[in-house]
Image (cartoon, coloured by chain):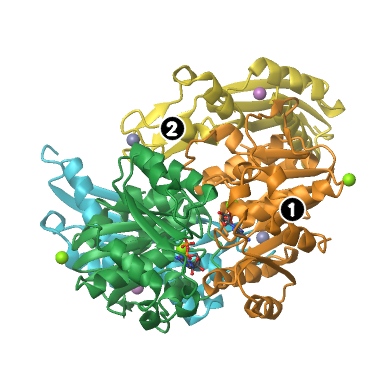
Chain colours: A yellow, B orange, C green, D cyan
């Protein structure tokens, strides 16, 4: 349910950009969702629909999934986050604060927690499409 | 690719009247005990208070206040649980009692997330306990938390003050308001800290003595409030506006 | 784009027999005083010794040892100047007495640079003073300094030990050798730390008492060596191999 | 003169890569030099020539300059590092440890030292060209 908080961020940021760019309406908002955070797409989608502003009346919210790609700083191993290997409590913690992955996950090759989250961390605004008054 | 979180932070904090970061360039000077007792003191005075522990490696406020068995509720974000009348949030909820080997960039990301999703509601005061140093956590609260003011803690040791002096220089350069400097663990009357603080252009708030009895009260809020430390600290805190 | 520096580090350290990192998850427990006096002790015993201060925010070994007016020489890299018979290197040479507000990623880059260009030559022992925490500096010496061993410092306080426990867990998980744990600023006989350390699978090396006279000796190597602290610490250090 | 230390790094790293790729000789090594570190190109070039291994007998060392691009985390300002604005002692310090730029330099627009070094920090190995036995 904290997906609502993140949805608010998307709506607010999209509104800011639309204003900056002088859009009179937004037709599409593309959001990338990193799998590390295990966001519930349905809830995020629902929240976005509920929170849409008048500028976004007809906007389509497109959610894209980005696999959580991790890379070990010690041995160079790259791997993809798989929530199945993680307990429920740990999974919930990572859902709230993805960085605690460093607490619960380690490199499958050398066991180090000193890895980089290359991509697929959390929620990012990928693009906004809209119409300008003179279009 | 735009991060939608930073823009949320001011909205999450808009119900908070005053935000005080308890900080020191130096470790082990008493930041966490000051942050914890300042929150207790403000709650006792009838304020609505929040306490946010941003020291991910060595979180201590939950140990000092004996906070255990609580977890934030998920509701359009996360709601800080209430302990001793204080709305409380800490990384320990998510890292449990395990080591959190986070590099600076991850600390930064985690702090942005916590600030963006935590719903403090209306608060008179939010106290933030920072890790030692001038690294990501300190730079990020300065960057993201509008109107934040710093309460700086030092000990009477030259080793501590030399670092605190640098921190005061930095805060001045960044135009971050400094409430003043607390001298903690004072053992004998000395004007070493007060003279230096004055010379460095900050307000000296007073000294809290070293208290032999403090350690036994760690983890027990009621006993903490009966310590010499708490009496001296409260007196000092009541001069803070 | 490849960074040519990491590969140099083992070459720069190939003349060094033993590398000891003085560390603690917790700040203010005495890492810097332990690192400084350990270097003095080893030099006194006739070893060739280096001391590297990697605490960029709150460097303290130069204050403790009274090192002033020195600067590394540039010669196919940089040569650490010698102070009190110790080859000495610190960020303070480059940051002077100014605040160094570095984020973790910058700390990491600066550490790699220092390790890659400093020519220690032949040394029996290199002592590294680390900042508090499990962040970039700690993770980087583990990552880049082959054969490094950790000397962990704590105080008898629960607030400190709860963090040190996590650090021991992490070091074990990373298979980093731990020489043992030093209990510093002990005030009364207690087996709180020794029992916990044993329980956490590390070696308890002994306690150094709180020394009222230490502060006055800060900055003066000769007086430092006459303190109760130094006597107790030396005895403890001589048990370390 | 600590350019020698960095040159050693370039030679050692290039040798390692050549071995990995099974090169029997190296014909060119391209090095990118960030202006923040104020490396003396002549000295670095000379050091590389002196340190060349048999594998590199005929190799050309190409040094490219990358301007030091800094970006403020507070106000977003981007600017290029200019050593002329910095004192001699400060300049030398940055030469050894480029990160101490955060100590001596601040954003020209808002005065914050909380900036990112986008590019042009120090010495990087950009490419190696060589010949394989079967070429
Ligand atoms: N005035 C005091 N008297 C006695 N002990 C103190 C006092 N202030 C702090 N301490 C102790 O010193 C240690 C460091 O305090 P802490 O609040 O954790 O510092 P920091 O957060 O700056 O690292 C703790 O063990 C704490 O109980
Ligand atoms: N055994 C001791 N007795 C008295 N003071 C001590 C003792 N150990 C450390 N100190 C003081 O405690 C403070 C913290 O020590 P320091 O070595 O700087 O710790 P750290 O490097 O862990 O932050 C300094 O003021 C130091 O002089
Ligand atoms: Mg603390
Ligand atoms: Mg109010
Ligand atoms: Mg220290
Ligand atoms: Mg030897
Ligand atoms: Ni959720
Ligand atoms: Ni040079
Ligand atoms: Zn690995
Ligand atoms: Zn700026």
**Quadrant location of the C terminus of chain C in the rendered image:** bottom left
Chain letter, disc 2 residue: A
The reply to whether label 1 and label 2 mark residues of one chain is no
Work out how far the residue at label 1 is from the one at label 2, CA to CA, in angstroms. 40 Å
* Residue B22 place in picture, x, y as percent: 68, 56
Mark 1 or mark 2, whichever is nearer to me: 1
Name the side, left or right, on which C86 lies relative to A104: left
SS for dot 1? helix
Name the side, left or right, on which B115 lies relative to A85: right
Name the side, left or right, on which C171 lies relative to C100: left
Chain letter, disc 1 residue: B
Image height check: is D81 above or below C81? above
The answer to whether residue D81 of the structure is visible from this angle is: no
* Residue C16 place in picture, x, y as percent: 21, 62
- Is A8 in front, or is C218? C218
Q: Quadrant of residue B203?
A: bottom right
Q: Quadrant of residue C120?
A: bottom left
């Amino acid at each position: 349910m904290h997906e609502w908080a993140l949805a608010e961020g998307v709506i607010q940021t999209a509104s800011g950009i639309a204003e900056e760019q002088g859009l009179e309406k937004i037709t599409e908002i593309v959001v990338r969702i990193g799998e590390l955070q295990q966001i519930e797409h349905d809830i995020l989608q629902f929240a976005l629909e509920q929170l849409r502003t008048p500028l976004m009346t007809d906007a389509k919210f497109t959610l894209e999934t980005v696999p959580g790609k991790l890379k070990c700083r010690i041995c160079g191993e790259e791997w993809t986050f798989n929530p199945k290997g993680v307990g429920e409590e740990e999974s919930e913690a990572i859902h709230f604060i993805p960085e605690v992955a460093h607490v619960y996950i380690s490199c499958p090759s050398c066991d180090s927690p000193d890895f980089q989250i290359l991509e697929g961390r959390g929620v990012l605004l990928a693009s906004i499409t809209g119409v300008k008054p003179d279009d | 690719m735009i991060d939608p979180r930073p823009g949320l932070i001011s909205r999450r904090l808009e119900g908070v009247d005053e935000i005080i970061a308890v900080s020191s360039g130096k470790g082990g000077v008493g930041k966490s005990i000051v942050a914890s007792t300042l929150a207790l003191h403000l709650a006792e005075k009838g304020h609505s208070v929040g306490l946010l522990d941003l020291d991910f490696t060595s979180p201590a406020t939950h140990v000092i206040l004996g906070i255990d068995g609580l977890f934030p509720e998920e509701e359009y974000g996360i709601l800080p649980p209430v302990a001793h009348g204080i709305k409380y949030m800490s990384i320990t909820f998510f890292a449990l009692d395990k080591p959190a080997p986070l590099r600076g960039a991850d600390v930064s990301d985690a702090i942005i997330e916590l600030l963006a999703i935590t719903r403090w509601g209306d608060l008179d005061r939010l106290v933030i306990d920072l890790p030692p140093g001038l690294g990501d956590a300190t730079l990020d609260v300065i960057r993201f938390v509008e109107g934040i003011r710093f309460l700086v803690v030092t000990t009477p040791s030259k080793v501590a003050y030399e670092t605190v002096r640098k921190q005061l220089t930095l805060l001045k350069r960044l135009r971050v308001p400094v409430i003043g400097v607390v001298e903690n663990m004072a053992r004998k009357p000395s004007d070493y800290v007060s003279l230096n603080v004055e010379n460095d252009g900050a307000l000296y708030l007073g000294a809290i003595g070293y208290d032999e009895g403090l350690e036994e009260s760690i983890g027990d809020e009621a006993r903490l409030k009966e310590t010499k430390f708490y009496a001296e600290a409260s007196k000092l805190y009541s001069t803070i506006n």
